[in-house]
Image (cartoon, rainbow, N blue to C red):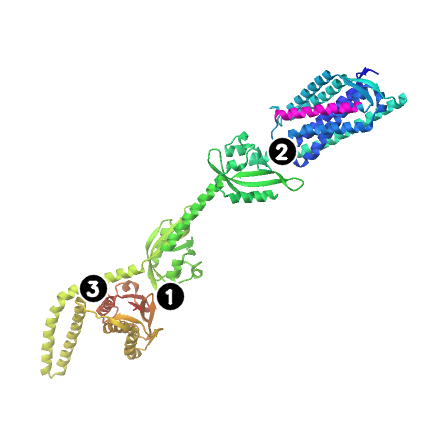
Amino acid sequence: MNMVLGAIHPFFIMIAIGLTIMASYTALDMFTLIKSSEPNKRLLFLGGSVTLGVGIWVMNFMGLISADSSGFASYQIPFTILSIFIGIAFTGMAFVPFFGKKIQLFHIMIGGLLLTVAVYATHIISLYAMNVTLKYNIPLCIFAGILIFCTFMFSLWILYSSKNYTHANQVWLKPVSAVIMAGAIAEGHFLIKRATTILSTTEIIKPSSGEGTFLTYLVLFVSILIIGGLIASSTLISKQLAASDTNLKDIKSALDASTIVAITDKHGIIVYANDKFCEISKYQREELLGQDHHMLNSGYHSKEFFKELWKIIGQGNVWKGEICNQAKDGSHYWVDTTIVPFLNEKGKPYQYVAIRTDISDRKKAEEHLKQTVKENTDIKFALDQSSIVAFTDAQGKITSVNDKLCEISKYSRGEIIGKDHNILNSGFHSKEFFKNLWKTIGEGHVWKGEIRNKAKDGTYYWVDTTLIPFLNDQGKPYQYLAIRNDITERKRTEEVLHRQDKLAAIGQLAAGVAHEIRNPLTSMRGYAEFLQLDEKDPERLEFLNIILDEIERVNTIVEDFMVLAKPKAVELEEKNVVPVIKNVVSLLEFEARKKNVHLHFECNQEIIQIECDENRLKQVFLNFIKNGIEAMPNGGELHVKTLIHESNVQISIQDTGVGIPKEKLKNLGEPFFTTKKNGNGLGLMVSFKIIESHNGKVFVESEPNKGTTFNILLPAKTA
């Protein structure tokens, strides 16, 4: 039987072409979702291959049935199944090249060629399934193959390589490509059938006409059911994936609008970079894609830093941290980075999403803050090393002190914090003094001056003080900084120099006057004693005795003047000062008891060696202790204490007498200044002079009605 397969049943052909278009669109929809749905790529690839493979078979099968429905009776089912599987296999292989990073022309050519082979293989195997002997028109077959190949290539080019293929144009480009691909399948069926001639048919028992028609429609129904099921399931999967992609796109759009986003493959190659990434890095998107993040390395971080980063994300864990990158123009910028690994079904990362936020300004501010803090710390350190520092709140309560304040005040930090500076008040300054001080700093002005404070152990010290108010937005002080420097030694030196200046003036006066006074005194004493020898009248003898006593008193004053004018050379030798003091205390104990004064001597050491002139030093101790006894007319307590203090011997003579007003205290030791009724002030003046000749110092502390303390400092003899 020589005939060409060419008769066509329009009903079957229309159904076949419609199903092929639907299968092509569904398959292309699934293939295009593979790149954006990595976890489902295998399911999508299998679904697309099966759908398009079955679509090619349905077009071929229904085209053959439409030409000769009676031939179905001799159809070999195994060959039919084989044709379906071969079509699916070649279809799958045709789309494998399109899932790489970059699609080129030869990928499209391979895809078109494999799809052409799928059409030819399905058609030829289906014909052999009908138990017929065929003859092919080779030139027409070649022409048909070229035409089919070109049509498939055009369809694939539209979908994968056209510059117009964007997310916006995908809506209409995919249906166009599906229609062209379905046309290539239909075109292949008709051209191959035209180039094929049946030479003979194997004789078989044919069913009745009614039975053949029933079987034909049954096969048609089953075919439509199969491909319809595939298309429905594929469409459902596509919709679910599309909905998922829509959510992802919404999330991605939100991220793109607010953060720097980049996506890399498992090897760290950048496959996506948003506009903010391009903007901050100064690179074009084309310059970033296909590269790794090493191109942004600023050199700020160590190799171990990135090694640890890759270790964390390579294990499927999220990494968070701050990274300093380098832009294309060489400038550096900081990003707060979160790198999220996306895992496949084996739990291995197949891509990474890096979400970054520009923190270059927050980092600059942080560096500035660090620098400011460092500068403040350095300034504070410098102040702490050189000055006495304290902070108070607006009410004057102490909130912070440094070690030097604790050291000089003898208070611990816990004893000072929360108190005001009244705890250090020595009583030396008047209320008006502090009132003016607070008025100055309360108005936001800096105050400078010298203050005498009192330590915890009762000793006094002088500080040169600067008080700085810190102002709030309303210009009102919210805290004060007090910076002080210890000037105790300077004040003592000033007092000594002041006293020495006065002594020098008195010495000059004494040098000029003493000799002139002593000559007439000698004559007056001589004549008075001469008159006394012959005088028998008791009253006149009493007058002469008074004259002689007054002459002696004047002579004593002249002697003191002479000491000041020309002090005797001091001969120092090493002595134990403890027995010297004990000796003086013993001498005056009787006098003290007569005036109801309890005299105490305290010393925690038996031997304290110093360089001294013992007799002249006794003169000083006698003078100071007698002054203390006389300052307590109604009795009291007098303590003589001796201790070692900072390589000096400190001898304190403390009474509980009437005390000395502060306005008179500063004049103590000046010539002719005294607080006693019958004193002339020269005794204290000479005593101070003797201590100075021993390289020592005297400082006096006193409060009215609380007593007076004479503190003598002498250099201790070190071993």
How would you rate the neighbour count of disc 1 (Cα within 10 Å): few for under 14, some for 14-19, many for 20 or more?
Answer: few
The mark nearer the N terminus, 2 or 3, is: 2
Question: Which residue bears the numbered disc 2?
Answer: 249
Q: Please provide the residue range marked out in magenta.
A: 104-127
The mark nearer the N terminus, 1 or 2, is: 2
The residue drawn where x is 75% and y is 22% is: 18
Query: Residue 83: which disc?
Result: none
Query: Residue 316 magenta-drawn?
Result: no
Amino acid carrying mark 3 in the image: Leu
- State how far apart marks 2 and 3 are (Cα): 99 Å
State which quadrant residue 576 falls in: bottom left
How would you rate the neighbour count of disc 2 (Cα within 10 Å): few for under 14, some for 14-19, many for 20 or more?
Answer: some
Amino acid carrying mark 2 in the image: Lys
Q: Which of 186 and 534 is in front in this view?
A: 186
The residue drawn where x is 67% and y is 40% is: 345
- State how far apart marks 3 and 1 are (Cα): 33 Å
Mark in front: 1 vs 2:
2
The mark nearer the N terminus, 3 or 1, is: 1
Please state the horizontal and vertical placement of residue 673, each as a whole percent of the image: 23, 66
The residue drawn where x is 80% and y is 21% is: 64
Q: Nearer the viewer, residue 129 or 464?
A: 129
**Residue 127 visible within the image:** yes
- State how far apart marks 1 and 2 are (Cα): 78 Å
Query: Residue 503: which disc?
Result: 3
Question: Which residue bears the numbered disc 1?
Answer: 457
